[in-house]
Image (cartoon, helix red, strand yellow):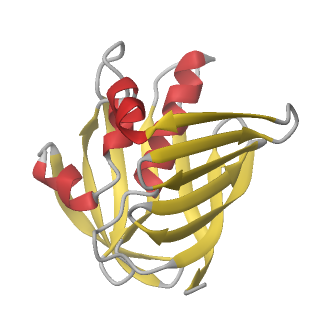
């Protein structure tokens, strides 16, 4: 279960991997793992964004990350730098940094949610406790964001697919 949660964190991190010049948008975030899970993503800029999925709301505002449990009505406030130390996949907040780290190769182009995307494939680290896993991402230069990702998690989870649909630019 912990490995599954780390995989989902990786996917959410990949889905909010953006360019420094990314456009403001919102959309429906979909994660396909042991069923389909849907949520919302609201992206203002690289420092301010929110996800609402699987009973949790995560708000990043500058150096602070707020995680709220809807059902438990409890919240946690975490320093963004601490979160990055504890979860290497969270470092994928900036697509340029992700591509500079190497290990990803351009393998094609495809349209996702009406946006032309470049497809990259390679390996990504989800934590120091697990080996790197195969990753494929679809990056829209127009929107400045990753719109789809696939991670091969291995048994018993298998492939985890995530994507953003119903994208609305602006507020």
Q: Is residue 81 above or below residue 129?
A: below
Q: Position of residue 142 (x, y in %)?
A: 34, 84
Location of residue 28 by image quarter: bottom right
Q: Position of residue 15 (x, y in %)?
A: 46, 56
Q: Is residue 135 above or below residue 87?
A: below
Classify residue 14 as left or right of residue 155: left
Viewport quadrant of the C terminus = bottom right
Viewport quadrant of the N terminus = top right
Residue projecting furthest to the right: 71
Residue projecting furthest to the top: 129
Location of residue 170 by image quarter: bottom right
Q: Position of residue 18 (x, y in %)?
A: 35, 64
Task: Give 92 or 146, whichever is nearer the viewer.
Answer: 92
Tell me which residue sits at (35%, 37%) in the image: 81
Tell me which residue sits at (20%, 60%) in the image: 96
Tell me which residue sits at (37%, 57%) in the image: 17
């Amino acid at each position: 279960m912990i490995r599954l949660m780390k995989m989902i964190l990786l996917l959410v991190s990949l889905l909010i991997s953006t360019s420094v010049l990314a456009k403001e948008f919102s959309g429906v975030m979909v994660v396909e793992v042991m069923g389909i899970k849907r949520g919302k993503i609201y992206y203002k800029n690289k420092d301010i964004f929110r996800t609402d999925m699987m009973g949790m709301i995560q708000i990043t505002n500058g150096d602070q990350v707020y995680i709220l449990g809807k059902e438990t009505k409890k919240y946690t406030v975490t320093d963004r730098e601490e979160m990055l130390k504890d979860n290497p996949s969270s470092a994928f907040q900036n697509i340029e940094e992700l591509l500079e780290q190497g290990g990803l190769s351009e393998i094609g182009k495809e349209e996702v949610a009406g946006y032309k995307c470049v497809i990259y494939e390679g390996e990504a680290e989800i934590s120091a406790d697990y080996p790197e896993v195969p990753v494929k991402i679809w990056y829209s230069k127009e929107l400045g964001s990753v719109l789809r990702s696939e991670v091969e998690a291995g048994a018993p989870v298998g492939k985890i697919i995530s994507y953003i649909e119903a994208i609305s630019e602006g507020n």
